[in-house]
């Protein structure tokens, strides 16, 4: 991680960039004076309730189906400890650091709104953990996406208490107590309501949504570039991407995708080579001709998801909540449905963008459809297999993406003795979307790798200024056409170039900023 400036955390909404900087790049955070004041004010109201005789959920009662039990004041600190220890029941592989940091930041923001009743000192510990790079170990399984991401957030809250397992700033596994001591962080004994406030949010699924939107914004630009490279390699036409044709169906994502494709294909000698009247084809295949329609629909889906995420970033999710007039009210805002739906929707779009990319790759390898390219782009077809199995890898990933596109949010399984009888499964939707985004990255990388080889095989005709710049980028680290060689490392190299935005940067050196 590297420092990317300090992110101020107060009652006002966080930005997408705030989340990315803290989660992915290790930026520090700072609770604002307004946040401290709001927390202190609402804490006073919680302490009144804690000292009174009126039952208040999670303050003087048990949780979930056990909410009918009134808890004696002498047992209320134990109530909060017991909540966190029992709810920190996750299992399975460790969740990525960036997801856990996003979750921690988003929970800190809800605390900073003053609607949870948490003491400023407790929020300060969460702030300090983020700044010290101490990351609680959170597990793959445990959240049903209702009553918040309970198990994942409980593993974070356990660390605030000085218990559980963490990774330190160097990524080493350590007992939380040891890591906190080394970082000079004093754990807290949770007071009334605080345990509940630390776990009753949709922060895990929202963090994964924000990260996904960031990644897909980049990958969909890459999909426009890879599609353009394939159209060019297959001697397709760019006439169908004309602005006036696209305007007949005025979806903004489609217009942007088509404009990007026109931009990177500008100046193509390959395109010009088959505009001499000798070409007898009337229309290109759908995977070429409809590329802006598919990638554009995916873009508009990301835009919808971003609208939902922005509303969530402006939310304070807890139960019960402290309102501005001092009332403490129960509510259902912790239900993850709004986030779960768009996480699932994005997985559908990812699967389709990958599917159309795989079809373009396959066309470049088939002599009956590639318009003069050697079989499988092999150096000596029969002796060499070229990119035959690279397409198999794409096909295997696309098949997996179809399974990952099956929505999690249509499922529900009752819990807590039927008190929590309908859940969102939003955490599960987020987990599978992350796998899907990794798969799309790999599918696009194989299309770029294959199209670059095909474009080299069209010489002496030269590609467009943008597509040519991408080919030159690849040739810095990946050889051009030739006899078969170990292909997996070349695929991984291009996966990195796609994942870190290098492919887009190369194209933009020729085209200027893409949409």
Image (tube, rainbow, N blue to C red):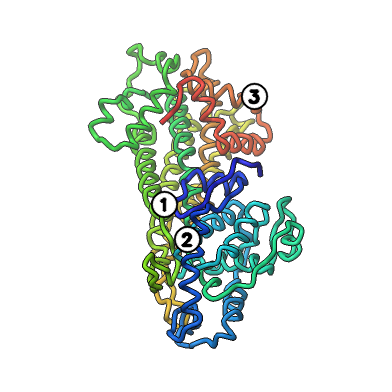
Residue 277, given in percent of the width and then of the height, sits at 32, 13
Quarter of the picture holding the N terminus: top right
In the foreground, 316 or 186? 186
Q: Residues within 10 Å of mark 2 (few under 14, many from 20)?
A: many
Q: Label 2, on which residue? A: 38
Q: Are marks 3 and 1 in contact (CB under 8 Å)?
A: no
Residue 333, given in percent of the width and then of the height, sits at 39, 66
Quarter of the picture holding the C terminus: top left
Residue 418, given in percent of the width and then of the height, sits at 42, 81
Q: Which mark is residue 132?
A: none
At x 44% / y 73%, what residue is drawn?
A: 413
Q: Which mark is residue 476?
A: 3
At numbered mark 2, what does the secondary structure look like: helix, strand or loop? helix
Q: Nearer the viewer, mark 2 or mark 1?
A: 2
Where is residue 385, by image quadrant?
top right
Q: Which mark is residue 309?
A: 1
Residue 443, given in percent of the width and then of the height, sits at 52, 41
Q: Nearer the viewer, mark 3 or mark 1?
A: 1
In the foreground, 335 or 509? 335
Q: Would residue 176 appear left or right of 279 to someone viewing this image?
A: right
At x 44% / y 38%, what residue is drawn?
A: 220
């Amino acid at each position: 991680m590297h420092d990317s400036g300090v992110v101020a955390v107060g009652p006002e909404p966080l930005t997408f960039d705030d989340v990315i900087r803290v989660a992915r790049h290790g930026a520090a955070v700072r609770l604002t004076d307004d946040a401290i004041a709001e927390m202190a004010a609402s804490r006073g109201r919680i302490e009144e309730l804690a000292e009174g005789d009126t039952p208040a959920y999670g303050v003087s009662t048990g949780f979930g189906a056990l909410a009918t039990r009134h808890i004696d004041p002498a047992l209320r600190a134990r109530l909060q400890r017991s909540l966190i220890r029992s709810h920190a029941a996750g299992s399975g592989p460790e969740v990525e650091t960036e997801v856990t940091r996003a979750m921690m930041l988003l929970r800190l923001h809800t605390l900073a709104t003053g609607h949870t009743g948490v003491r400023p000192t407790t929020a300060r510990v969460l702030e300090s953990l983020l700044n010290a790079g101490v990351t609680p170990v959170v597990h793959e399984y445990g959240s049903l996406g209702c009553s918040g991401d309970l198990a994942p957030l409980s593993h974070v809250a356990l660390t605030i208490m000085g218990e559980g397992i963490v990774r330190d700033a160097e990524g080493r596994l350590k007992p939380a107590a040891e890591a906190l001591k080394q970082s000079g962080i004093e754990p807290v004994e949770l007071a009334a309501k605080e345990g509940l406030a630390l776990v009753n949010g949709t922060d895990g699924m929202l963090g994964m949504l924000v990260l996904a939107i960031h990644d897909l914004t980049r990958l969909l630009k890459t999909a426009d570039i890879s599609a353009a490279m394939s159209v060019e390699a297959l001697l397709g036409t760019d006439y169908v991407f004309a602005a006036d044709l696209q305007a007949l169906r005025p979806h903004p994502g489609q217009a942007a995708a088509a404009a990007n494709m026109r931009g990177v294909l500008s100046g193509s000698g390959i395109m010009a080579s088959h505009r001499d009247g000798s070409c007898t084809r009337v229309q290109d295949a759908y995977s070429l001709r409809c590329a802006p329609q598919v990638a554009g629909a995916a873009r508009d889906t990301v835009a919808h998801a971003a609208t939902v995420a922005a509303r969530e970033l402006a939310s304070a999710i807890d139960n019960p909540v402290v309102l501005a007039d001092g009332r403490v009210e129960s509510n259902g805002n912790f239900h993850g449905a709004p986030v779960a739906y768009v996480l699932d929707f994005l997985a559908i779009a990812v699967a389709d963008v990958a599917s159309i990319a795989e079809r373009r790759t396959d066309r470049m390898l088939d002599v009956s459809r590639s318009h003069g390219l050697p079989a499988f782009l092999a150096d000596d077809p029969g002796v060499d297999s070229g990119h035959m199995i690279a397409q198999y890898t794409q096909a295997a990933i696309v098949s997996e993406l179809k399974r990952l596109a099956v929505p999690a949010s249509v499922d529900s399984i009752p819990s807590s003795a039927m008190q929590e009888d309908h859940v969102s499964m939003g955490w599960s939707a987020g987990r599978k979307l992350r796998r899907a985004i990794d798969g799309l990255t790999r599918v696009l990388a194989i299309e770029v790798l294959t199209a670059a080889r095909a474009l080299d095989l069209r010489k002496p005709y030269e590609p467009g200024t943008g597509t040519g710049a991408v080919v030159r980028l690849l040739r810095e680290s990946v050889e051009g056409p030739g006899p078969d060689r170990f292909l997996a490392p070349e695929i991984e190299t291009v996966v990195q170039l796609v994942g870190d935005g290098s492919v887009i940067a190369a194209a933009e050196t020729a085209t200027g900023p893409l949409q």
